[in-house]
Amino acid sequence: MSDRNERRDEILRAVVDWMIANPKADFSLRDVASDIGTSARMLIYHFGTKDALLLAAVEAVGARWAADLSAGQAGSASNSLTAFWKTSLADPNARGLHLLTLQLWTQALAVGGDLYRPFLDRLVGGWNRIVADMLVQDGIDPVAAQHRACLTVAAVEGLILQALTDPAAPVDAAFTQMIEDLERWTDANAQGGP
C-alpha cells in the first residue's frame, strides 16, 4: 500500500471516530480537520468533497460490520445475527452511527444520483445478500432465502429505528422473538429438514 493510501486510511479511521462521536451530516470540513489533527485541504485532497468523505466513512463502517457479520457465519444464520446484534448493532456506542446512517439514507433517497448509489446498494442489497447466503448455508432454497433475508434485514432496521426513537422500546426482546421466528421458519423450510 502506498504512503498516500496509508495516510488516507489513517484519516478515514479518525473521521469515522469523529462522526460516531458527532452524529450529524451537517458539519464543516474545517471542524473535522481541526478535531482530528489535519487540514480541510488534506481532506479534500484525499476525498474530493464533503459528501464523498461522509460516504467513505459510512462505507468503511458498513464494510467493517459486513465483515463482522460474515465472520460469524460459522453457525446458523440466527446465531450469526444474534451475535452481530449484541456486539455491533445494539451496542449503545453505535447510536451515533445509526443516526448518521439514517440521515444519509434519507438524504440519498431525496437527492439520488451516482454519489449515493454505492451507499444504498450496501445498506440494502449488501445486507440482504449476506443474510440470504447464511440462510442458503442453513439449507434454504436461494429464492426463499432472498425473500426471508429482505424481511429479516427490514425488521432489524426497524428495530434500530425504534431504539433511536424510543430508548425504552423493548427492542432486544423483539429481536429475540424475531430470531425465534426465523429459527422456526428455517427448521420448517430447510431442504432435507423435518
Image (cartoon, rainbow, N blue to C red):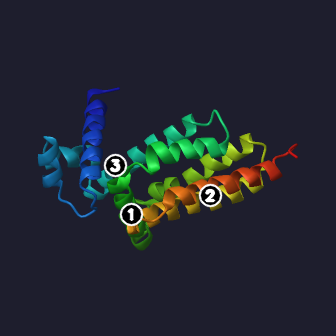
Q: Nearer the viewer, residue 39 or 84?
A: 84
**Residue shown at the point (48%, 45%) measured from the top left:** 86
The answer to whether mark 2 and mark 3 are in CB contact below 8 A is no
Q: Name the residue under label 1.
A: 167
> Where 194 falls versus 124 (above or below)?
above
Q: Mark 3 points at which residue?
A: 93
**Residue shown at the point (47%, 54%) measured from the top left:** 118
Task: Give how far across and how far down residue 60 sits, in percent.
Answer: 39, 44
Q: Locate residue 76: give its quadrant.
A: top right
Mark 3 residue crowding within 10 angstroms, few (<14) / some (14–19) / many (20+): few
Q: Mark 2 points at which residue?
A: 177
What's the residue type where badge 2 is placed? Answer: Gln
The number of discs equals: 3
Q: Which of 94 and 11 is in front in this view?
A: 94
Extreme residue toward the bottom, this view: 110
Mark 1 or mark 3, earlier in chain: 3
What's the residue type where badge 1 is placed? Answer: Pro
Q: Distance between the residues labelled 2 and 3?
A: 24 Å
**Residue shown at the point (39%, 71%) measured from the top left:** 111
